[in-house]
Structures are given as C-alpha cells and as structure tokens.
Amino acid sequence: MDSLSQIALGAAVGVAVMGRRTAVWKAAAWGAVAGTLPDLDVLVDHGDAILNMVLHRAETHAPLWLTLFSLPFALAVARLSGECAQWKRWWLAMWLALVTHPLLDAMTVYGTQLALPFSNHPFGVGSVFIIDPLYTLPLLAGTGWALAAKGRGRAFAANAAGLVLSTAYLGWGVAAQAQVERVARESLAAQGIAAERVLVTPTAFNSLLWRVVAVQGDAYFEGFRSLLDEGSQMSFDRFPRGEALAAELPGHDGWRASRTSARASSSSRNRTAVCCCPTCAWARSRPISSPS
C-alpha cells in the first residue's frame, strides 16, 4: 500500500496496543515509524528498474526478519521514550506495527515475499488497489480523534473503530473480487474462451470497478466489471501477448527475475493469478520491447 496508509496503520496499531500506558502522541509517532520502516528497501538500487520492482517487498517485508528486528527496535523505543519498564508492551506494539505492514501489502497485487528466507514466493491477493482512500480514511480519522482528545473520553474507542472499519473494508474487497471473478469466468466460458489464467484486480482508488485479464495461448483478453452493472455477462477485448519478442531479452536480469516471479505465482495461485506484481503482469501479458 501507499506510504500514508502504512503510516496510518502503524500509528493506529501503536495507539491501540499502548492505550493509556503512554502518551497517545508517543504511541502514534513510534507506530508510524515502525509502519513505514519496511519500505526503506526502496532506497536500494538493484541497477535495473524491473529488478527494483521485483525485488521490492523482499527481506524487509519478511515477518521472520521483522520479528527478529522488533526486539532491539522496541528496546531502543522504550529507552528513548523513558519507559524502559514497559519495554515488553512497546515490543508488542512495534512488532505488530512492523508485521502488519507486509500483511497489508500482501492484499495488493504487487507480490510480497512473506516466506523469506525459506521461500521467495511472492504472495498477492490483489483485492485492494495500492491507494484506496476508503481504507486509509478510517485509520486517519480514528487516530486523529485519539490524538485530538489526548486519550480522554472515547479516544481509544474511535481509534479501535478505525482499525475495525479499515479491516472490514479489506474483507469487503476479497468478497467483491470473488464475485467479479465468478462472473468473469462464466462470461469467458460462454464466449468459448478457455482461459489458462485469470487476474481480477480493482481499478484505481476504489473497489467498485474491477479489471479482468485472462490469458489464452498467445493472446490475452481484457474486460471491466462494475459491481453496479446489471446482467451477468462481461465483454472482453483481445490483444496479442507479443511473446515472440521475449527472445530479444534472454540475458536481461530484470526479465528473468520477472519471469521467475510470474511462474512462482502461477504455480500456486492459478485461481486468480496471471502474475503477482504489475511488472510480471506487464512482462507476461503485454507486448515486450527491448530495454533502452
């Protein structure tokens, strides 16, 4: 997800876990820091734009490594906050703020390597767009209320409500994705299209309009479905995949990495996956041109 969403989630988690044990602003501030730390891997340049995309959300997004990092990080936070006696509670808050980051990322289509170091398989549900105000706003409102109220009144209830609403929205996205996929597969079958793989993702900033990509042989079919559409049929446009052009990139590291990522995704997520990240989706289903 976008940085603002991750900051908002980390802050809300920090406030929820610490409660009245510390100042609300401390819990929100340190939670926001922990919530954005995993994305510092964007500062690492792998020397290629495609590699930078494919190798993002790797080690810094692995729950195992984040768990190991959370202990010294929480000890430092407790010391800097002057609350060493509460280091265990700070550890719980920082650990949750850290690990919820990759779990949220895994709900998008980019692909998050949650199983490192045991597997570099990219996990991606693809049921929420990388920027969705309906996910982020409840978190901002709940935490903002808690900060403004300085922990008084229903401050913590408002923060908890923001977490519940945002999490419920993720659940709604999964249900909506399943509904669109059902309609898409029925429509493809009715039109005689035997799809090898199907990708269903929301369009930008919403969960009402969905994009469907189906791969069949040397072509792919693209269609759009709104949850407000009447009827049970979808229309699709056919495009060539341009696979012959792939021969021009046999030694390109980014291309090889994207193909590996795509094969890993397809092998275990045939239900919805064409691939697990935008780079792989482009590489597998769009015409390919040589890098400049």
Image: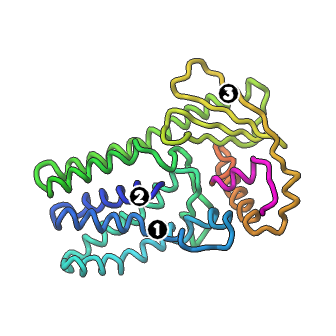
x, y percentage for residue 27? Answer: 25, 65
Helix, strand or loop at mark 3: helix
Q: Which residue is mark 3?
A: 186
Question: Distance between the Cα atoms at labels 2 and 1?
Answer: 10 Å
Kindly identify which numbered label has been placed on residue 208: none
Helix, strand or loop at mark 2: helix
Visible in this render: residue 217? no
Q: Earlier in the sequence, mark 2 or mark 3?
A: 2
- Tell me the kind of residue under disc 2: Gln
Q: Which residue is mark 2?
A: 6
x, y percentage for residue 221? Answer: 74, 36
Residue 109, relative to residue 64: is it above or below? above
- Tell me the kind of residue under disc 3: Glu
* Image quadrant containing the C terminus: bottom right
Q: Residue furthest left?
A: 153
Residue depicted at 70% across the width and 36% down the height: 222
Mark 2 in CB contact with mark 1 (< 8 angstroms): yes
In this view, the residue in front, 224 or 125, is 224
Residue depicted at 18% across the width and 53% down the height: 148
**On the rendered structure, is 2 left or right of 25?**
right
Q: Earlier in the sequence, mark 2 or mark 1?
A: 2
Residue 55, relative to residue 129: is it above or below? below
